[in-house]
Amino acid sequence: MTELLKSSSPEETRLFAGRLAAHAQAGDIIALSGDLGAGKTVFAKGFAEGLGFPYPDEVVSPTFTLMQVYEGGRLPLYHFDVYRMADASEAEAIGIDEYLFGEGVCLIEWAVRIEEILPKERVTRVTIRRDEAGGENDRMMEIHYADAVCSRIGSEDA
């Protein structure tokens, strides 16, 4: 299932991310794409908040640390930024498999760089773009839900 959403503010982006987090289960992978400044970190803050992390404003892009673990919510959030990685072998070298198949949810910024090692059946892809026709804070979010997430959303909305 694919969904196209418009956000007119960082708060709306966070709210959508929080709603997606409400459906998250251990082993889910959220692959974030978007230009620099598109709103990936804003999305990550909302996702952490939706998981119940008590300090979502402390969520920052792990650009230089590559990975940050956030605990204290209903599931751990493993937040990766793989922008600086040359290829998937670097992600494997830092032990990403431990997290991809771990007890939490992986949120991966610039996931396209390591796409070949991600278990495709568990990946929900979120692409965030500036809405050129809108205002400064307007964003378009295209979401391609993993099959497992589709079934959870469908059963909870019924």
Image (cartoon, helix red, strand yellow):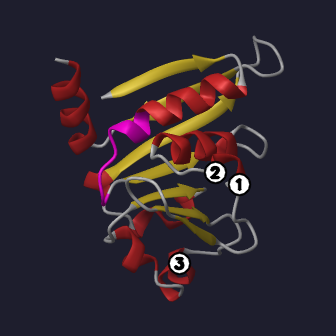
- In the rendered structure, find residue 92 and report the number of the disc placed on it: none
- Mark 1 and 2 residues: CB-CB less than 8 Å, in contact? yes
Q: Residue at x 46, y 77 (%)?
A: 96
Question: Which mark sits nearer the N-terminus, 3 or 1?
Answer: 1
Residue assigned mark 3: 91
Q: Residue at x 60, y 69 (%)?
A: 68
> Horizontal and vertical percent for residue 66?
65, 72
Who is closer to the viewer here, 38 or 87? Answer: 38
> Horizontal and vertical percent for residue 20?
42, 35
What element does badge 3 sit on?
helix
Provide the residue span drawn in magenta.
20-27
Taking the view exactly as shown, the residue that stands out farthest to the right is 136
Q: Is residue 54 magenta?
A: no
Mark 1 neighbour class, 10 Å CA radius: few under 14, some 14 to 19, many 20 or more: few
What element does badge 1 sit on?
helix
Residue assigned mark 1: 58
Residue assigned mark 2: 55
Above or below, comparing residue 69 to residue 131 in the picture? below
Dominant SS type (magenta): loop
Q: Residue at x 64, y 51 (%)?
A: 55
Q: Amino acid at mark 1?
A: Glu
> Horizontal and vertical percent for residue 117?
39, 70
Mark 2 neighbour class, 10 Å CA radius: few under 14, some 14 to 19, many 20 or more: some
Who is closer to the viewer here, 90 or 6? Answer: 6
